[in-house]
Each structure stands twice: as structure tokens, then as C-alpha cells.
Amino acid sequence: MAEKTDEQALMEFPCDFPIKLMGEDTPEFHRTVRKLVEKHTGPLRDEAINNAFSRNGRFVSITITVIAESRAQLDAIYREVTAHEAVLMAL
């Protein structure tokens, strides 16, 4: 039997994977992050997206739970979202 790679040992694909994106709470930010993630996953269900707002309401943390197919897919999503100027932080 072949040994598992580090990637396989840590995660089994496909799997549900939450991606948290933070930025200013504007309609544009909500649309932009959804569009950026959907480029790599296809259409997202509304139920897969949750918002948490900052105390003063200026910022939002959007958690998008995707069905991750591979580590390469997750890497591509993170590269894309972190390169966008509206995304202040991605976890």
C-alpha cells in the first residue's frame, strides 16, 4: 500500500472547507468575494455564506464554506482573494 502524502494525511478531499474573508462592509465587497471564490468552485449556495459584522458596522467577516476538491484548488482561491485590494485579510 502506498504511503499518504502530507496533504492526504492532513485533509481528505473532497471536504467542506471554510474560507474567511474580511473587508469593508459594502455591497461591492460582498459581490466581489463571492465572485472570486465562485471562479474556482462554481456557483455557491446562499446557505454556504455567513456574515459577522464588526462592532461599529464598518467591517464584515464573510465565511464561505466550499466543497474543496484539492489542495491546489484551495491554494488558487487564496492566491486570488489575497491579491484583491478589497480583501483586508483571508483565513
Image: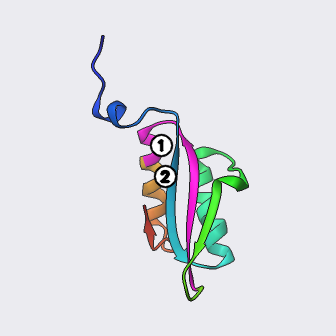
- How many tags in the picture? 2
Mark 2, residues whose alpha carbon is within 10 Å: few (<14), some, or many (≥20)? some
Position of residue 6 measured from the top left corner of the image (x, y, whole percent): 28, 34
Horizontal side of residue 37 vs 43, given as left or right: left
Q: Residue at coordinates 44% horizontally, 55% vertically from top-left? A: 78
User: Which residue is pictured at 49% across the width and 52% down the height?
Assistant: 77
* Residue 60 location (% of width, % of height): 57, 75
Q: Residue at x 64, y 69 (%)?
A: 30
Q: Position of residue 16 (x, y in %)?
A: 54, 43
Q: CA distance from mark 1 to mark 2?
A: 6 Å
The part of the image, by quadrant, that contains residue 5 is top left
Q: Please determine whether, in this image, residue 2 is positioned above or below residue 90.
A: above
Residue in the image at 48% along x and 73% along y: 85
Q: Are marks 1 and 2 in contact (CB under 8 Å)?
A: yes
Q: Amino acid at mark 1?
A: Gln
Q: Please give left or right for residue 66 compared with residue 47 in the image.
A: left
Q: Which range is magenta?
A: 58-74
Crowd class of label 1 (few under 14; some 14 to 19; many from 20; radius 10 Å): few
Q: Is residue 85 magenta?
A: no
> Is 64 covered by the magenta stretch?
yes
In the image, residue 89 lies at what x, y percent? 43, 69
* The label number, if any, that marks residue 9 in the structure image: none
Q: How is the image coloured?
A: rainbow
Of residues 22 and 50, the one drawn nearer to the viewer in this rendering: 50
Question: On the image, numbered disc 1 is attached to which residue?
Answer: 73
Residue 9: quarter of image: top left
Q: Which mark is residue 77?
A: 2
Quadrant placement of the C terminus: bottom left
Circle 2 sits in a helix, a strand or a loop, which is it?
Answer: helix
Residue extending farthest to the bottom is: 56
Q: Against 74, is 69 above or below?
A: above
